Image (cartoon, rainbow, N blue to C red):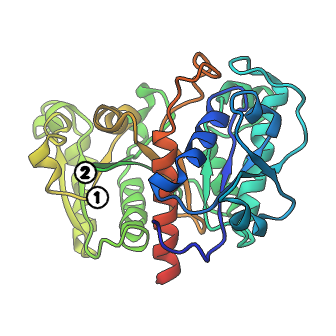
Amino acid sequence: MVEGHSRPPLAISIGDPAGIGPEIIAGAWQQRNQAGLPPFLAIGDARSIRAVWDGPIAILSDPAMAADAFADALPLIQVDDPGEIMPGKPNLAGARCALDSLELGVGLCRQGMASGLVTGPVSKAQLGAIGFVYPGQTEFVAERCGVTATQAVMMLAGPSLRTVPLTVHVPLADVPRLVTAELIITRTRVIARALVRDFGIAHPRIAIAGLNPHAGEQGTLGREEVDIILPAIESLRAEGHDIIGPLSADTMFHDRARARYDLALCMYHDQALIPLKALHFEDGVNLTLGLPIIRTSPDHGTAFDIAGTGTATPTAMIAAIRMAAACSARRAAA
């Protein structure tokens, strides 16, 4: 079992209620004993969960009641009733439910009423239709926590690999101008602190990927490695950080290469997510570093196409809950 059940429960926002969020949260609760999960409470719409699951739900008014209810029912705080939400059929009411759930989850963590936040998958298109202006949940949570965009760092993690994309949801054509030495240095400092604080790695080893094929071949395939990435690495080494790179991305993710570092900082979204999902498609976790609260998420989307069919598995949700619990325990013990 994960230690620290005396701490407040974890909060899990439901995500888009028409997606697989309701069933993977319920599935995680069903596997709570064999998976060794600490108490958690869902935040969202009970009707959406009941549409895909016939297990027991305890609707609570106080998060402090979750630990007592957890053994016998899935604890849930109901947000404003969005009406009937059909699995696989997203609508604007469901998007508002997702946003309300996320907002409440952040608030509970900020108030110390939850020990961490696990966010269910949302639809950026549906949220955008109700005026959500953030690239994703990461940026929303960061702003609500008073953290700047450069200090909030998205990490993807599985049992054998951790990666961070330096640039995230931007067109590939924009990446070269966004890769700066300042951003590399800032993100690496956040990463190093988080690996110590949240993962208990006393002396983090960080690998930094090149931007161009073969890490630029000493400038023949691009100058970013020579002019930007290597100077940033040298500055970080001067601060005492254990850094290797810039490395050619096509040779830094095999077994022997991964043994050399604790985390890989990559230059763009797919460079970080493709190896992570190739290795840990079922149990990858998205974690936001640099926040005053713990925030994790299963590293997959809403899967509207399979919502309500009974084929979604809670593996990644369970991994996200475990990681949130472990990070919260380390912070509490510090």
Q: Position of residue 5 (x, y in %)?
A: 58, 72
Residue 229 vertical placement versus 123 (above, below): below
- Quick check: marks 1 and 2 in contact, CB under 8 Å? yes
Residue 193 vertical placement versus 136 (above, below): below
Q: For the residue marked with disc 1, what is the amino acid? A: Ala
Q: Which residue is mark 1?
A: 232
Q: Give the side of residue 215 with respect to residue 262, left or right.
A: left
Q: For the residue marked with disc 2, what is the amino acid? A: Ile
Q: Nearer the viewer, mark 1 or mark 2?
A: 2
Q: Within 10 Å of the Cα at label 1, are there few (<14), some (14-19), or many (20+) other Cα atoms?
A: many
Q: Which residue is mark 2?
A: 208
Measured in 3D between alpha carbons, the distance from the residue under mark 1 to the one under mark 2, in whole angstroms, is 10 Å
Q: Give the side of residue 119 with respect to residue 268, left or right.
A: right
- Tell me which corner region of the image, top left, top right, bottom left or bottom right, holds residue 308: top right
Q: Quadrant of the N terminus?
A: bottom left
- Which residue is drawn at the image coordinates 12% and 32% (left, top)? 220
Q: Secondary structure at mark 1?
A: helix
Q: Position of residue 36 (x, y in %)?
A: 47, 59
